[in-house]
Image (cartoon, helix red, strand yellow):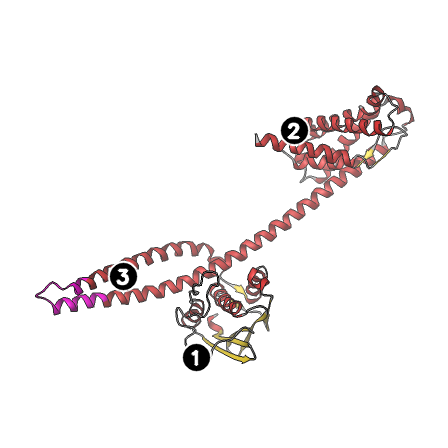
Amino acid sequence: MKEMNSTIKKIILICFVTTFMGQIYLNPFNSEFRFSLSVVAFSLFLYFYKDLNIITVSFITGIFVFAFRMLMQFLQAPELQILELVHIHYPAIGYYIFFGIFLRISNFRGLHDKKYMFIVMVTLSDGFANIIELLIRMDNIEKFTGFSVIFFVAFLRSFITILVIEVINYYEMLLMKEQHEERYKQLILLTSNLKSEMFFIKKSMDDIENAMEKSYQLYYNLKDCNKDQDDQLSFAALSLSKDIHEIKKDYLRLTAGLEKILPEIETHDNMQIKDIFNILKSSYEKNPTVIDKNIQMDFNYTEDFMIKHAYQMISIINNLLINSIEAIDDHGRILVNCRKIHEDFQLKVIDNGIGIKSEDMNIIFEPGFTTKFDEDTGKMNSGIGLTHVAHLVHNYFKGSIHVDTVQAMDEGTTVFIIKIPLMNI
């Protein structure tokens, strides 16, 4: 039922647009015979609506055009008889029917890749259909001196048709390319987040292993101290050890699942810093928080670098950008700079947000530290963004991170400076 409704809607659209375009026309032979752009519109609809039957649509369109022309002329000259109006306009039905038949025979829908053949077939179909319409209008055929005008106009209309098809296809290709690039950028950001989470999970697994060993040791110590009595504390320690062991197994399953996914996207691990900046810039240009806060973001580099561990670098910059965005209230600016200093790669992320309190400077990289909360729910943020950054800089890149902030009036300027040996990036 839905398919039928869709087909009917398409046919009605074709009839209306073709008829409307048919009102822009020329009468080259001093008769009701017309040259118009309706044929271009009609051909385009038949080409793109490949689910429609060409012959059926041609017949219905011919009837619709015939009826519309009769109505228009009747409104302009009501003194004309109905039979007279039918005699004037019924040849239009013949044109559309035979034009559709010729297009169907030529299989013009399958000729797009053969552009010259497409033009030839549509030109011949249009030209022969026009000749048949002229033959039907026998009253003025003696005034017609040749076929050159008909086929020249048919050629122009077929050329316009293929030109419009090419423009539409080119636009669709650009749109698909843009969508593909957007998905690629999202994939890179997702991958960088997954990889940084992997590092954090593996670090947590080491902590879990240590906690499990300590809990087992506590169990044995308590058991030795209370050999002669049933001590609830020793059993509680044993129960705790078992729980920690279960948590460790869950972590192992999680990391195994993530590691199965990550190798499939390892091929793009090497990226230029220029491309990393473009991805992040494009991502944040559409970020509603950045737009609402009126934040200007600038990415600069003195020379392009090849980053061998691109996802980790993206994760570092991304988390620092999120931190800077959260530090800005209404409007502000974030500047990301990178350059080479001797044998080091230096990255700076600067914002003019609220700054960092001096008493918090030594603990901002600690897990769980945060000064931000969700105003809607009242819940504090997780506070692991900067912890991720510090973990990646210190443990993965073997670099250093330094933060400084300067208070000025009600505004602060915060600078995160990261230095990484060039051999490690």
- Main SS, magenta region, reads helix
Q: Earlier in the sequence, mark 2 or mark 1?
A: 2
Q: Is residue 197 above or below residue 343?
A: above
Percent coordinates x, y for residue 270 in the rendering: 50, 63
Q: Residue furthest top?
A: 83
Is residue 373 on the magenta stretch? no
Percent coordinates x, y for residue 276 in the rendering: 55, 64
Percent coordinates x, y for residue 251 in the rendering: 33, 58
Q: Which residue is mark 2?
A: 53
Q: Residue furthest right?
A: 143
Left or right, 78 with reference to 425: right
Q: Residues within 10 Å of mark 3 (few under 14, many from 20)?
A: some
Q: Which residues are magenta?
A: 215-235
Res 244 label? 3
Which amino acid lies under the numbered mark 1 shown in the image of this protein?
Glu
Which amino acid lies under the numbered mark 3 shown in the image of this protein?
Ile
Q: Is residue 376 above or below residue 400?
A: above
Q: If the image is split into quadrants, where does the N terminus sit? A: top right
Q: Residues within 10 Å of mark 1 (few under 14, many from 20)?
A: few
For numbered disc 2, what is the local secondary structure? loop
For numbered disc 1, what is the local secondary structure? helix
Q: Which residue is mark 1?
A: 359
Mark 1 to mark 3 CA distance (whole Å): 35 Å
